[in-house]
Every structure is written in C-alpha cells, then in structure tokens.
Image (cartoon, grey):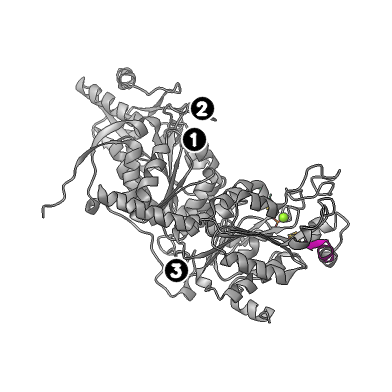
C-alpha cells in the first residue's frame, strides 16, 4: 500500500510556507511531486540528507513546498548547482527537477554533460512540451505542427526525445513515464535514486492550460487519457516499426548500465594526489 | 625543532592566487579554460585533491559558477577563475549569489575586450562590468591586485570578506600581473587570518535563514547540517520563501545594501604613499599602480609633491578615503588601461573640488612609468 496523501502531506510539505502553491488545478506537476515523495518514503531517506534543486519554470517551483534542503536556481542551471552540492558533500542525495525548456533548451548543454560526466545525481524532467510559466511558447519538445503562442502558424521544428537523448549522452540510468502512469513514475524515481551514477527520469506531463487547450487535446483528464492511449512499454516498442511508434510514448526503463561513477573516481584521484604530495 | 621559516619563492601572479586560495581554505574550484587565467585551474586541479578538496572542469563558465555556488551552499569555500568572455557568461549566476547571499570568489584575469578582444594583452576594461554586470541593484565587492604578493594576500582577503558578509567577491587581476614572475616571501600558515561564515547557533526549528541581525548578515547553515531551508534567487522573506509583499521586498533590498554599508571601514582597502603633504596625487589600481608608484617616486626626487592612492577595493568605491585628498590637492591623475572607468568614479565623488585628469591606454600595452611621470611634471607646472 502506498502511503496516503495525508501522510505524505504531513511528513514532507512545509507548514511554515504560506500556501497556496502557484500551480493550476489539475497540473501534472503535483503528480510528479507525489511520485517523488512516495519514492523517498519507500527508500526511507532522511529529509536532512536530501537536496532538491530546480531551475525556473512551473516545475521549478516544486522545491519551495517541500521540507528538504531546497534550491531554486536560475533557468536551465539546476544541474550545475547540483553538481557543486554533490561534489562538496557526496553523502547527500541530490535530485534536480527541471522542465523541458529548462533541461533541454537553455540547460541542454548541462544535461548532456551531466550525463557524460556520470556524477551520482538524479534528474527528473517534467516534459509538458511547452513553456508553461511564461505563457505557452514552444519548447524543444513541442511537436511539429503544434500551435503555441510563438507558433500560431503551426510549429515547423522537430521535437527532442529527451530520454533517448540522455541515453546517447551516456547516462547510467534512463527511464520514462507519464503522469497517467503514476505508480510507474514512483517506481522509476525510486530506481533512479538508488542507481549509482547519473540517472534521468523523464515524465510526460500535462499543461492543459497552455498546451492542451490550444491544441484541441482538452483538459487535464483528457490529456491524461491521451497519455494512457499513447503509451507503449519499452518491451512492446522493441517489436514495433518506427512509423508505428510516431505518436507513441515509450515508457519504462530505456537503459540501466554500470559505468564508473565520477564521484567515486574522484576519491581515487584524492588518494593519488595525497601520495604524490607525501613523496615530494 | 626549529620554527618554520618563510621561504622566498619565484611565483607568477596566477600561482600566487592559487596559494592564496589554498591558504584561505578554499576547497572547491570549478572553471573553464581561458587565457590568461588557465594556470589557476591547472594548478588547482593538482593541488585541491591532495587537501581533500575538489576540482572540476565544467562545460562552460555558466556551469562553473553554478557549481561554485552549489559547493558553497554545501558548506565548502569555493571559487572560479576566468577572463572577460567567461566573466560575461557568469553574470546571471553572480546575481544569484548576491540575492541568495552565497559566499564565493570569482577571479577575473582581465584581457583586452570587447568580445574575444586581445586574449594575451593586459586591460582593465571589466571594472564597471564587475560592479554592474548582473542585473538589478545588488551589493558586490570588487578587489584589484597589482603584484604577485598582492595576488596572494588579496585572494585571502577576498575569501574572508566573502565569508564575513555573505557576498560574492570579484578579484580583478590582469594579464601582466598574472604572468609576471616575482620573488616573494609568502606568509606562513599561522600568519594568515582565515575567516569562516557564522553557523547558526539556534536549534533547527528556530532557524530563519534570512533573518536580520545587527550586522545584517544572517548565519549560514550548510545543506546536510540539519537546518533544512530554502534558497532561491527570487526576492524572499526572512524564511527564505518568495515574496511580493512590498514591505518584505523593500526590506530584502535594504538589508543587502546595509550589510555592506555597515562593513565599509573593513571592506574599503587602499594603500597610501606620500599622501600626507601631497599637492597632486595619482589614483591607480592593478598593474598600472606599479607604473604609478615608480613615476611618483621619480617625481618626488625632483621635488614634486605627489602622492599615490592605490585602490585595492574598487567597489564599494572608497569615497571617504578619497574626499580629504580631493580637498587637499589641486589635481588628481587617473591612469587606466581603459577609456576611463574608474576616473568616472573619481569625478563622481570629486564634486568640482580638484581637477581630475584621465590618462588612458587601450592599445594592449601597459602605461609606462615614464608616461605617468611626464603627466605629473606637466600637472605640477600648473
Ligand atoms: C535566463 C532566463 N531566460 C528566460 C527566462 C524566462 N523563463 C522562465 S520559465 C521559462 C520556461 C519554462 O519552461 P519549462 O522549462 O518547460 O518549464 P514549465 O514552466 O513548463 O514547467 C522561461 C523561458 C528566465 N527566467 N531566465
Ligand atoms: S501553466 Fe501549465 S505547467 Fe504551469 S502550472 Fe499551469 S498547467 Fe501546470
Ligand atoms: Mg515545460
């Protein structure tokens, strides 16, 4: 049995913070927040040892509400701050929470380098295919043809597949879920946080206010229903042709591999440097 | 056992910055290669791991300062080093450090600009960028080094001020200081004063991360210390949470400014030479201060009553130190490797009391002692 919403609320929400939060009713960000908290509960991690770093966007507001060590950085830069925190105190569990624009437009360089570098960090990317906070402009994951406030004639660029990008860039663990598949999201975040090395969980989410409405997909419930229908498991996807997969969302674990983790490798460098100095 | 003695060493300015950082207990460096600052990163990549510190080369300068701020929030003294183009990229996150009051040190070894400019030539074109480069009103401390020994001591000072006031401190060096080798005697470890940020003394439940005290500098908990709190670049209340309440917004800005104003006597550093009976003086900083000192000494020999006021702290601009001399002297000469970035500060505080004379070079070459001397002779003739 997953912990009740009330139990999570009492345990993890900041009671000294003046609520309400900034999210629209029905926003997928809340489901992702719930998934993160359920994963943390299951892992029995101490609140004092968790650092939650975010960038700027609707998604970026999540740390404000949660009773961890929380860091709301600049747009696109959550992973850079998280890198400093983790290297300075490797005992901390460091999670970066980002939006699609945050992680793959302005912060795209940091994402691929964090994946390549393979520090022991967890990245959760809430992909709602839009710049939610700034009023619905197109993002690097907006589909071709979509209507946004900066593509009223139809979008003419092509979307990134974030999870596949992270695999290619070298992350140790990469998975995808949607906010409809909340139980899967809980489990994938849990796995990501356990994984030594850089772990990415992309969660396809609904911004019905800025995206769904304008693209005739509808309200929150209708968007979630669409995610349900579009989802195929990694296993099933492997048996399908690329054309069949066009409008599908592949969910599950895309990669889980064991690579040297740079946070551990650095320990060796310290020993080597100390030995070198003693010799001198 | 005999007492450890100071030893003489032949060092570059950049090497002295490394020594100063280590002496100040800096244990984290993140950077991106750029001439003429790269030696700082290269040496720290060797030295930091040996003292349980961390070096990382990031993907760009934006990432470098991000990592530095993250490390500082986790309780480790941290710095980065760059030159003009990289310093320009750091501005947004420099503002974050101002707003969230995260101590850190940013070294900018200045080279010719704008843009890629003159990568291997000295310049002082980044002075106003260091003060105003990030957006919004914000407090910042900017120090300038003029010699190899300075590079050591002022780097230590930079860390100490940054820890004491919870502000980013910018250290401006230039290509000449960075690459000149000088024989220096560095102080021993026990002779170096090291300041650490003040940790909260109250129980975690009582901790308000941005609560005002008499000094205006709140105690700082590190992530992982049990004082869970929120850090943001949004304007925040004393609990650290975003606010748009006009009274709280006003209070946020006023305290950031006030903590620096209260510390001015401690922060505004200058060196005075021959100033007591000067009728004419030079205001200079960085490598130009070396040429100026030589010129002043030569002018003294021929009976010109000229002094040198060397600025170590460029910002907050040491107005109180300057004012009496602007009344005492008929002229002040401000030589700089730019088109007049500090002379405008001197003009601003002068208010017509004294003649302010600019002397500028932007051809990638140094201002020589002879050039300054010639100006001094001219000015002393009236
Ligand atoms: C340097 C910078 N450029 C632009 C902005 C404005 N901005 C704020 S949030 C945002 C986009 C957010 O989109 P996304 O990352 O997808 O997050 P979402 O709001 O959809 O969760 C932008 C462009 C900013 N804060 N900083
Ligand atoms: S604008 Fe979109 S992403 Fe932002 S809170 Fe509203 S629904 Fe969520
Ligand atoms: Mg988005």
Per the rendered image, the range of residues in magenta is A225-233
**Spatial CA span between label 3 and label 1:** 36 Å
Image coordinates of residue B336 in percent, x first then y, are 40, 28
Q: Return the disc, 2 or 3, that comes first in the chain's sequence.
A: 2
Residue assigned mark 1? B84
Magenta region includes residue A226 = yes
Indicate the position of residue B112 as horizontal and vertical percent values. Answer: 47, 28
Ligand 2 falls in which quarter?
A: bottom right
Q: What's the distance in space between the residues labelled 2 and 3, CA to CA?
A: 45 Å
The chain to which mark 2 is attached is B
How far apart are labels 1 and 2 at the CA level?
9 Å
Q: From where the camera sits, is residue B265 visible?
A: no
Numbered badge on residue B117: 2
- Residue at point 64%, 66% (across, down): A189
The kind of secondary structure element at disc 1 is: helix
Queried whether the magenta region covers residue B310, the answer comes back as no
Crowd band around label 1 with a 10 angstrom C-alpha radius: few (<14), some (14–19), many (20+): many
């Amino acid at each position: 049995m997953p912990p009740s919403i009330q139990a999570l609320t009492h345990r993890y929400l900041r009671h000294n913070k003046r609520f309400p939060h900034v999210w629209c009713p029905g926003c997928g960000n809340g489901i992702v927040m719930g998934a993160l908290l359920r994963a943390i509960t299951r892992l029995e991690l101490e609140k004092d040892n968790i650092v939650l770093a975010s960038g700027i966007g609707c998604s970026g507001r999540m740390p404000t509400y949660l009773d961890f060590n929380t860091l709301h950085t600049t747009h696109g830069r959550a992973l850079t701050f998280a890198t400093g925190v983790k290297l300075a105190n490797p005992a901390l569990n460091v999670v970066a929470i980002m939006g699609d624009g945050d992680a793959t437009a302005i912060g795209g360089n940091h994402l691929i380098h964090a994946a390549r570098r393979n520090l022991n960090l967890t990245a959760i990317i809430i992909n709602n295919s839009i710049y939610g906070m700034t009023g619905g402009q197109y993002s690097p994951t907006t589909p071709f043809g979509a209507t946004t406030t900066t593509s009223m004639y139809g979008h003419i660029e092509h979307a990134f597949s974030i999870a596949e990008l992270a695999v290619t860039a070298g992350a140790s663990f990469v998975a995808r879920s949607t906010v409809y598949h909340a139980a899967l999201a809980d489990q994938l975040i849990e796995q990501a946080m356990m994984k030594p090395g850089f772990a990415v969980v992309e969660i396809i989410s609904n911004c019905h206010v800025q995206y769904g409405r304008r693209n005739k997909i509808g309200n929150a419930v209708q968007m979630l229903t669409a995610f349900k229908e579009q989802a195929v498991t990694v296993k099933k996807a492997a048996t399908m042709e690329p054309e069949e997969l066009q409008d599908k969302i592949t969910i599950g674990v895309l990669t889980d591999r064991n690579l040297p983790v740079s946070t551990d490798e650095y320990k060796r460098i310290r020993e080597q440097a100390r030995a070198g100095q003693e010799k001198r | 056992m005999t007492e450890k003695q100071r030893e003489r060493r032949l060092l570059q300015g950049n090497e002295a910055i490394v020594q100063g950082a280590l002496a100040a207990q800096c244990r984290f460096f993140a950077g991106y290669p750029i001439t003429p600052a790269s030696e700082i990163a290269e040496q720290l990549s060797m030295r930091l791991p040996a003292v349980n510190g961390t070096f990382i080369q990031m993907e760009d300068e934006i990432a470098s300062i991000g990592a530095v701020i993250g490390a500082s929030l986790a309780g480790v003294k941290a710095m980065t080093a760059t030159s003009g183009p990289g310093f320009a990229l750091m501005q947004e996150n420099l503002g974050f450090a101002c707003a969230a009051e995260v101590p850190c040190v940013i070294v900018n070894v200045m080279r010719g600009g704008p843009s890629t400019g003159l990568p291997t030539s000295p310049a002082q074109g980044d002075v106003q960028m260091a003060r105003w480069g990030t957006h919004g009103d914000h407090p910042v401390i900017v120090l300038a080094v003029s010699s190899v020994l300075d590079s050591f001591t002022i780097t230590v000072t930079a860390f100490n001020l940054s820890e004491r006031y919870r502000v980013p401190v910018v250290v401006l060096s230039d290509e000449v200081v960075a690459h000149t080798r000088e024989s220096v005697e560095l102080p021993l470890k026990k002779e170096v004063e090291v300041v650490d940020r003040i940790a909260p003394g109250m129980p975690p439940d009582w901790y308000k991360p941005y609560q005002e005290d008499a000094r205006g500098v709140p105690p700082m908990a590190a992530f992982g210390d049990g004082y869970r709190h929120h850090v943001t670049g949004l304007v925040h209340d004393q609990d650290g949470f975003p606010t748009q309440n006009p009274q709280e917004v006003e209070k946020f800005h006023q305290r950031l400014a006030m903590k620096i104003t209260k510390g001015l006597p401690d922060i505004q550093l200058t060196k005075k030479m021959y100033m007591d009976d000067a009728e004419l003086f030079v205001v200079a900083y960085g490598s130009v201060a070396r040429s100026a000192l030589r010129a002043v000494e030569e002018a003294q020999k021929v009976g010109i009553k000229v002094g040198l006021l060397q600025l170590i702290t460029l910002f907050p601009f040491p107005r109180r130190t300057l004012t009496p001399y602007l009344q005492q002297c008929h002229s002040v000469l401000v030589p700089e490797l730019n088109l007049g970035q500090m002379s405008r500060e001197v003009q601003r505080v002068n208010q017509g009391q004294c003649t302010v004379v600019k002397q500028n070079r932007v051809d990638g070459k140094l201002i020589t002692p002879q050039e300054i001397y010639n100006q001094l002779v001219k000015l002393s003739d009236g």
